[in-house]
Image: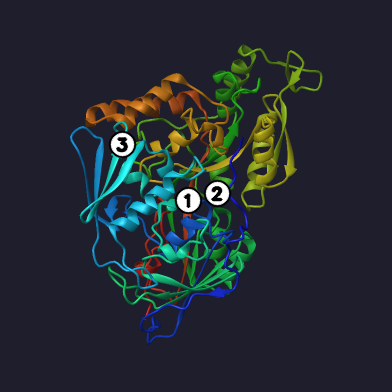
Amino acid sequence: MISRRTILTASLALGVSFVATGRSAWAEDQRILQITSPREITSLALADTSYHFRRLRVAETLVTITPAGKLAPELAESWSVSDDGLVWTFVIRSGVRFHDGTELTPARVRDAIELMRKSRNNTEMVSQLPISSVDVDGGAVKITLTRPFGLVPDFFTDGPAIILAPSSFAADGSVTQIIGTGPYRVAKIEGKASVDLESFPDYWGEPARIGRVHFTGTTSPDTIANMAEAGQVDLVLGLPQALRDRVAASGGVRIKPVQTARILGPIYNAKDVRFDDPAERKAVSIALDRKGIATAIFKNPDAAANQLFSPALPDWHDPKLPPIERNLAEAKRLLASAGWAPGPDGVLVQKGTRFSFPVFVGKQPEMAPLAQAIQAQLAEVGIEVVLEKGSQAPVLESVANGSFVFGFTRRNYAAVPDPVATLLVDYAEATSAQAVWGGINYHNADLESALQRYVSATRDEDRAAARDELMALSNSDLPVLPLIWYDYNVSISDRVDFDSVPVDALEVSFWIDRVKWAD
């Protein structure tokens, strides 16, 4: 059964203002920082939009990730683990207040963790932790595990691990308003597309440099590009790659790009006869011209992926691996070795099954040319790709009913700093059925074993050995086909100090509290 995120839940506070307590947060400078990103606020459920309010610096987690990709204290000022790896102690920062004026206490943190543990969404990181109990110990919270698990701090950087005030919740546990601890608080939410923020005067850390922010969310790439070109926004956070050069040429803005840990490429049903053999998956891989696609469509030849993990994850990226070169002759040989032969119309056939499948093409500007390029290149080895306009919905439905064959993913392997967290979601037996955007129906006992050895390791050398095995398996067995490493692009208007805008390769936060005006 596929677990889907709740869409437009009844808890969405449409058009409702939050009247904050305390002195006014408006700065003397009444200018408003106008920002946009290709995400709308579909609900207030923690599994759905918590990532959004963390990026907007409204809500915070126990542990955060710096723009350089390193773990750092946030609501927990420090943490430690017992020698046996079973007890993690998080010292809760004192003097922290929620936006409604109430105090952050270890008891509130304990209650929040208990709520995370009860989540029905197995793709949320904290719900996967092998926790046996959560207890308050003076100014700290102690988390006792049933077995050693080395990624506990990493998992507490996940979006749904934000800590909200009790007043954020209705009696049934649903979220009705976002009352966090961040440098910005919500002034008003209007529908799915608009949020007004104001700086929080009682923030425990360094205050926001700009007092007022207006966020506009839109899923239309052309609308985002038009807003940047017309000077309607100061920051576009997540400008689509295919529109980067167009916006940069418009004048009045500059682009700050960074290569992320997000992969763009084909996913397939590993139980389907067309992809159940690694030889078939490798044939598809080497039938594609990565360098040509990266250069022509994404305007960045360095985006051509030769492995699953990009340089944004240096501990997991092997710089010695050569590029994956296109080799049509070898692709045809591999397909023949797997039992495929050309049919009357040139499309490969095996025991009555044609190597043909539909692909739903989303509305992102790069998807249509990418799909067309893959269609043309796979046709040269006898694979027929039928393109259909669509969205995520038919993909989800086809996975749920078992008819899915081939599609595209933009999988982020740094939802938390260590990519093993995402690998566990996608390939651990307990959660892989819910992992729609990873390798579907892919199972490998060696990979599962390496995952478990990695997370339970208490010695660095044991963890490194498991990591090496995981890298080798993911790059040879191809549960997901790496094609393009995705860039995260920020469009910055001349009104904003260019150097003050951090660009986060792990896409954790917009860091808008660090932004300042150009003058």
The disc labelled 1 sits on which kind of residue? Asp
Residue 156: % across, % down: 36, 48
Residue at the spot of label 1: 487
Work out how far the residue at label 2 is from the one at label 3, CA to CA, in angstroms: 45 Å
Which one is in front in this view, the residue at disc 2 or the one at disc 3? 3
User: Which numbered dot is residue 298?
Assistant: 2
- Image quadrant occupied by the C terminus: bottom left
- Image quadrant occupied by the N terminus: top right
Residue in front for this viewpoint, 205 or 255: 205
Q: Would you say the residues marked 1 and 3 are in contact, meaning their CB atoms lie under 8 Å apart?
A: no
Q: Would you say the residues marked 1 and 2 are in contact, meaning their CB atoms lie under 8 Å apart?
A: yes
Which one is in front in this view, the residue at disc 1 or the one at disc 2? 1
Which one is in front in this view, the residue at disc 1 or the one at disc 3? 3
The first of marks 1 and 2 along the sequence is 2
The disc labelled 2 sits on which kind of residue? Phe
The reply to whether residue 44 is in sight is yes
Residue at the spot of label 3: 145
